[in-house]
Image (cartoon, rainbow, N blue to C red):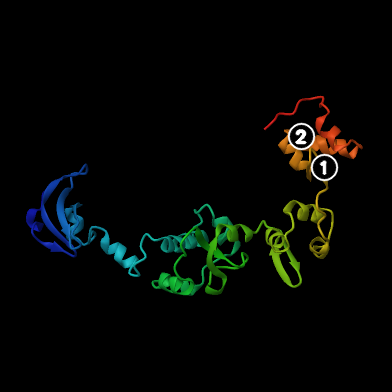
Amino acid sequence: MKDFSIIGKKFNKLLVLEYSHQDKNKKSMFKCQCDCGKIGIFRGTEVKNNHTKSCGCLRDEKHTKHGYYKTAEYRAYIDMKKRCYNPKNKHYKDYGERGIFVCDYWLGEDGFEHFIKDIGEKPKGKYSLGRINNEKGYYPENCRWETDIEQNRNLRSNLLLTYKGETKCVSEWCEIYNINKSTFKHRYRSGWSINKIIETPVKSPKKYNYKDEYNTVIYFSKKYGKDNNRVAARLRRGCSIVEALELPFKYKTKTP
């Protein structure tokens, strides 16, 4: 039986305007206006029994009194908690299952307010929430907004090496001491210590004179569409740079 007595009455933030229709379950639906100005269709019994109190804005106000609803900061905060506490989250095994948790100060009713006060708003650009020490959890001293480069350098899979009391990943050491990354890794795989890797000068590639130019094998190979490895192999066998570049190969090399 339709209950038209609720028309014209206000329940919480919803003013019942008029009857609308019956839904598929034969429940009476009414058009209502929320205090925020939005108009929607709601089930009459749920409005009357206080199950539906607003158009949805009341729920948003309750959870976002801080004013950051739908912002990057709030999404980062929610995702952080999901990784740590929701076993169904695809990243849970790398966080909650490993014992990575969020400090109590950042949880509870005022958790987000404390979180944003401690680390501040996200800088403009491509930044995301990161941890300084990936073996520890989320708390003020261990969290910051990081660029993609900083995030990649802080991956658990990265090789961390200590030199002169400082521990950094390979990319950082290469950048600081201007060492080619492949050279660094080759030296490391050859059993060199971090001190020897950094302190041993890197030899400059040998240069050759060809057609009034003085440059490396890589440069000439690329310029004339030759296979760098084949040219280098000829030079090791004693060929001149002219022979290495100009003698025909058994198999043709594609030009760029």
Would residue 124 be visible to someone looking at this image? yes
Mark 1 is surrounded, within 10 Å at the Cα level, by few (under 14), some (14 to 19) or many (20 or more) other residues, namely: few
Give, as a three-letter code, the residue at label 2: Asp
**What residue do we see at 53% from left, 72% from top?**
139
Spot occupied by residue 160 in the image (x, y as percentages of width and height): 71, 62
Query: Up-down: is 108 above or below 170?
Result: below
Precedes in sequence: disc 1 or disc 2 = 1
* Residue 252 percent location from the top left of the image: 76, 25
Quarter of the picture holding the C terminus: top right
Q: Is residue 51 above or below residue 233?
A: below
Element carrying mark 2: loop
Callout 1 amino acid: Asn
**For this rendering, which residue is in front, 182 or 102?**
182
- Is residue 155 toward the left or the right of residue 200 in the image? left
**Residue at the image point whose x is 19% and y is 56% from the top:** 38
Q: Position of residue 60 (x, y in %)?
A: 31, 62
Q: Nearer the viewer, mark 1 or mark 2?
A: 1
Which class describes the residues within 10 Å of circle 2: few (<14), some (14-19), or many (20+)?
some
Residue at position x 81%, y 53% in the image? 204
Image: 210 above or below 126:
above
Viewed as shown, does residue 203 lie left or right of 76?
right
Residue at mark 1? 209
**Picture quadrant where residue 7 is located:** bottom left
Q: Could you tell me which secondary element the residue under label 1 belongs to? A: strand
Which residue is denoted by mark 2 in the rendering? 227
Q: Could you tell me how far apart the alpha carbons at marks 1 and 2 are, in whole angstroms?
A: 18 Å
